[in-house]
Image: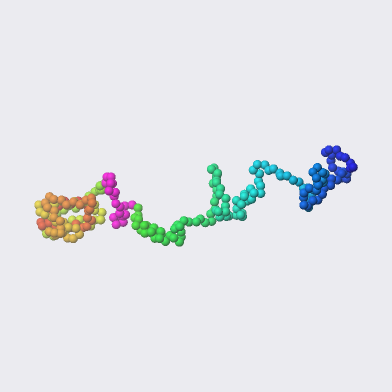
């Protein structure tokens, strides 16, 4: 018999004890021919002690099956992938700003690009030529508009300013004379015949006694204002020298 050792005694080199033998049994199975007989421990071809039984795993423990299923859901390789090969994620509701670098973005069909702006540029250039400069302009340089058919009243402020006296008399009966020269700023005109005979006026063309000149009878007046005022030269004629007329332009 070998030397006995107390429980929990420290191991030292050269200790002597009884050798417990085991049998290598590659095929496995019992080597005792009847129940209740003694048999040595058995080892496999790798020297592992043969045991039987199943170890119980805790609830929800990972197994080869669950790990394989998880592995199948992971991207096949590291690095950028297509949407179909990538995880979907949800940002936190209090996520701070994330810097994003984009090499290129897909554009929708028909989106404007440097190659697809020719028509747009042409249209914009056309619109630009039809847009007048800011501020008041002449009719020919203004954008036409249509007032709504249910437009409420629009307040209109009449023009105000000084008038220039163009009154005088006929210097030579039967001969036309200039009452007022061309005036591009003219906004108002009144001519009153204060003589006993007829007076005739015409615009640009020399006045004559008769059509197409306009007759102004004694004490009658000719007025141009508001919607239309001629800026042309005004010619006047009367049959008698000294016929008086009152005229004002503004």
From the image, which quarter does the N terminus lie in?
A: top right
The residue drawn where x is 86% and y is 39% is 5
Viewer-closest of 207 and 3:
3
Q: Is residue 201 magenta?
A: no
Q: Position of residue 232 (x, y in %)?
A: 22, 57
Magenta: main secondary structure: loop
Left or right position of 224 against 113: left
The residue drawn where x is 45% and y is 61% is 115
**Res. 198 visible in picture:** yes
Viewer-closest of 147 and 9:
9
Colour convention of the picture: rainbow
* Count of numbered tags: 0
Left or right position of 63 against 26: left
Viewer-closest of 142 and 19:
19
Q: Position of residue 27 (x, y in %)?
A: 77, 52
Q: Position of residue 7 (x, y in %)?
A: 83, 38
The residue drawn where x is 42% and y is 61% is 118
The residue drawn where x is 86% and y is 45% is 19
Viewer-closest of 147 and 136:
147
Residue furthest toward the top?
7
Left or right position of 180 against 13: left
* Bounds of the magenta segment: 135-156
Q: Is residue 145 magenta?
A: yes
**Res. 242 visible in picture:** no
């Amino acid at each position: 018999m070998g030397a006995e050792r107390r429980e929990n005694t420290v191991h030292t080199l050269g200790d002597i004890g009884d050798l417990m033998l085991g049998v290598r049994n590659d095929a496995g199975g019992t080597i005792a021919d009847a129940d209740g007989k003694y048999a040595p421990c058995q080892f496999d071809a790798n020297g592992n002690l043969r045991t039987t039984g199943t170890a119980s795993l805790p609830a929800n423990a990972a197994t080869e099956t669950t790990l394989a299923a998880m592995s199948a859901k992971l991207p096949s390789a590291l690095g950028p992938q297509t949407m179909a090969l990538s995880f979907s994620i949800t940002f936190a509701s209090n996520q701070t700003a994330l810097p994003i670098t984009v090499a290129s973005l897909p554009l929708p069909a028909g989106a404007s690009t440097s190659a697809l702006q020719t028509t747009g540029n042409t249209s914009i250039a056309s619109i630009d030529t039809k847009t007048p400069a800011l501020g008041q302009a002449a009719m020919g340089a203004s954008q036409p508009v249509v007032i709504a058919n249910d437009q409420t009243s629009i307040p209109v402020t009449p023009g105000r300013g000084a008038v220039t006296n163009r009154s005088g008399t006929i210097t030579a009966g039967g001969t036309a004379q200039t009452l007022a020269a061309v005036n591009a700023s003219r906004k108002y005109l009144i001519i009153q015949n204060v003589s006993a005979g007829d007076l005739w006026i015409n615009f640009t063309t020399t006045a004559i006694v008769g059509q197409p000149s306009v007759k102004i009878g004694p004490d009658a007046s000719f007025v141009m204002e508001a919607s239309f005022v001629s800026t042309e030269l005004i010619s006047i004629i009367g049959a008698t020298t000294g016929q008086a007329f009152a005229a004002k332009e503004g």
